[in-house]
Image (spheres, grey):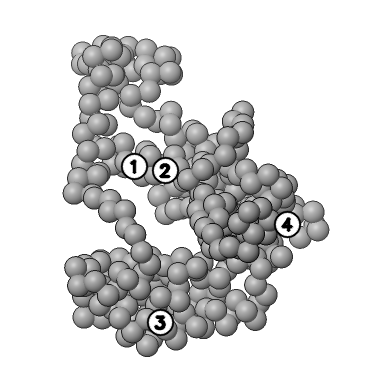
């Protein structure tokens, strides 16, 4: 298997091996995960090997998901860097060219940064950014409702008093409550008109139902579902100018270079057959995701 050749050097071998041995990932700080995540349990058809039901086919419950690639590629190998001047530092490689190269940060830190960014923007409506290089939590200190920095608060109050004005920094419980209300409103606005529909059945069944025709603005396909792009009815569920995002094979550690190239070529061929136009950087070497749009 190849982790470094995928470009995901931020996944530390120790973390990857730990996950392979225990199934535990994303432990950080003093957190210890000692309870199983039963939401990942599922059923597959199997044949009983012993007991009174030996030889009979039954649905067997277990963990039948990925045990090779690791969950780290979902949130731990990339982040948005356009609004944060320090975000690129999360991928800094020390001792380049010496044969002892080492990433300064690892995938769990990147994942924590991503989660902070998601939650921050939901609560405040503004993108999250660090105020100090290599400190993923430093942006939290810039929150207007954070009163942990008492010296800054006192300085702000004194400066405002000297100018005959009032401080804009919340310094009372009422001010902090008001800030919390502002955040609550922002959260409500973020999820306004958002609905979640749990669905049963496979994608092929979804494509066959008229109620889904022309419904979707964006369709995202994982590597395990990418083959549905080859279905002749795939376009039926898309709105005009809809976007289709397909996971590439960049982080599939069990594939060699030839197999990865074959997979990526197959994705392009299926998209072309559906009349989809590639809109991401077509010339980019080994993309992590393909993005297409449906031309109206």
Marks 2 & 1, CB-CB < 8 Å contact: yes
Residue where numbered disc 4 is placed: 96
- Estimate the x, y position of residue 56 in percent, counting from the top left: 58, 63
Between label 3 and label 1, give the one nearer the viewer. Answer: 3
What crowding class fits label 1: few (fewer than 14 Cα within 10 Å), some (14-19), or many (20 or more)? some
Q: Secondary structure at mark 1?
A: helix
- Estimate the x, y position of residue 193 in percent, counting from the top left: 18, 49
Residue where numbered disc 1 is placed: 121
Say which quarter of the image contains residue 271.
bottom left
Which of the numbered marks, if any, corresponds to residue 230?
3
Q: Residue at x 63, y 64 (%)?
A: 55
- Measured in 3D between alpha carbons, the distance from the residue under mark 4 to the one under mark 1, in whole angstroms, is 35 Å
Report the side of 135 relative to 234 (left or right). Answer: right
Report the side of 244 relative to 52 (left or right). Answer: left
Looking at the image, the residue that sits furthest to the right is: 99
Q: Is residue 9 something one can see in this rendering? A: no
Mark 2 or 4, nearer chain start: 4
């Amino acid at each position: 298997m190849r982790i470094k050749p995928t470009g995901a050097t931020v996944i530390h071998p120790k973390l990857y091996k730990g996950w392979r041995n225990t199934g535990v990932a994303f432990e950080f700080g003093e957190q210890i995960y000692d309870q199983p995540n039963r939401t990942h349990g599922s059923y597959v058809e199997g044949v009983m090997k012993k007991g009174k039901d030996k030889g009979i086919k039954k649905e067997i419950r277990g963990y039948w998901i990925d045990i090779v690639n690791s969950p780290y590629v979902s949130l731990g190998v990339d982040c948005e860097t356009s609004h944060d001047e320090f975000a690129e530092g999360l991928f800094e490689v020390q001792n380049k060219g010496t044969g002892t190269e080492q990433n300064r940060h690892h995938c769990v830190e990147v994942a924590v940064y991503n989660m902070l960014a998601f939650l921050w923007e939901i609560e405040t409506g503004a993108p999250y950014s660090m105020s100090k290089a290599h400190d993923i939590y430093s942006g939290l200190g810039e929150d207007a409702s954070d009163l942990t920095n008492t010296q800054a608060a006192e300085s702000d109050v004194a400066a405002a008093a000297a100018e005959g004005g009032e401080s804009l920094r919340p310094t009372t419980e009422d001010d902090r409550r008001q800030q919390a209300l502002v955040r609550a409103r922002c959260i409500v606005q973020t999820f306004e008109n958002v609905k979640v529909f749990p669905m049963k059945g496979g994608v092929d069944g979804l494509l066959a139902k008229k109620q889904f025709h022309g419904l979707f603005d964006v369709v995202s396909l994982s590597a395990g579902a990418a083959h549905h792009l080859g279905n002749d009815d795939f376009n039926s569920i898309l709105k005009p100018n809809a976007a289709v995002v397909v996971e590439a094979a960049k982080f599939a550690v069990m594939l060699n270079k030839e197999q990865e190239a074959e997979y990526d070529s197959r994705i392009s061929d299926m998209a072309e057959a559906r009349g989809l136009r590639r809109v991401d950087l077509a010339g980019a070497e080994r993309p992590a995701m393909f993005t297409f749009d449906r031309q109206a």
